[in-house]
Amino acid sequence: QVQLVELGGGLVQAGGPLRSPCAVLGPTSSSYAMGWFRQVPGKEREFVSGITRTGGNTYYGDSVKGRFTISRDNTKNTVYLQMNSLKPEDTAVYYCASDRHIRPSLGQAEYDYWGQGTQVTVSS
C-alpha cells in the first residue's frame, strides 16, 4: 500500500514560482515512477510531468514544458514539482501519482495510487 501526500499548494501571483512536494509513504519511492497531473472542474485530468524510478528521465506536458521541473529525492521518499512563470491557466488541483512501471505513463489509467490533491491558484 502506498500513500501519497501533496504539499505546497496555495495562491501565487502570475509570473511567480511555487514548489510542491509529494511525500511517498509506504514502500520505498524508488519502486515507482511518479507523475503529476492537474484537473480543473469540468475537464479531464491532464498529464503535467513524470519522472522515472531513478530520476534519470523526465517528461512534461506541452503546456508546462520549459516552466515546470520535476525531480525526486529517493533518500527522502519525496517527489517535487517546481513551477515557475506561473500563469492563471495553471490554476487547478494538482495530484501526484505512482506508476509501477519503470517509466511514467502519460495516461492516468496506468497509475496505481493517487494523492488527495492540492489546490494551486494563480492570480492575474
Image: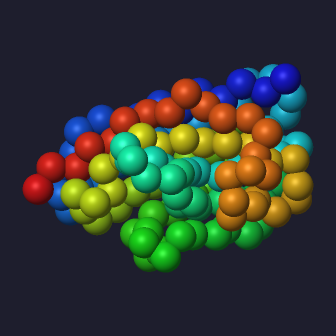
- The residue at the point 23 percent across, 39 percent down is 11
Residue lying at the far left in this picture: please name it.
Answer: 124
Q: Measured from the top left, where is residue 23 in percent x and y? A: 63, 31
Colour logic:
rainbow
- The residue at the point 43 percent across, 52 percent down is 43
Indicate left or right for 10 with 20 as reference.
left
Numbered marks: total: 0
Residue lying at the far front in this picture: please name it.
Answer: 42
Q: Measured from the top left, where is residue 1 in percent x and y? A: 84, 23
- The residue at the point 76 percent across, 59 percent down is 104
Question: Which quadrant holds the C terminus?
Answer: bottom left
Q: Measured from the top left, where is residue 15 in percent x and y? A: 21, 62
Q: Up-down: is 119 above or below 111?
A: above
Q: Up-down: is 66 above or below 113?
A: below
Q: In terms of depth relative to the viewer, which is nearer, 24 or 95?
A: 95
Q: Measured from the top left, where is residue 67 in percent x and y? A: 40, 69
- The residue at the point 23 percent across, 49 percent down is 122
Q: Up-down: is 9 above or below 65?
A: above
Is residue 54 among what the camera can see? no
The image quadrant of residue 10 is top left
Is residue 12 among what the camera can see? yes
The image quadrant of residue 63 is bottom left
Q: In terms of depth relative to the viewer, which is nearer, 35 or 18?
A: 35
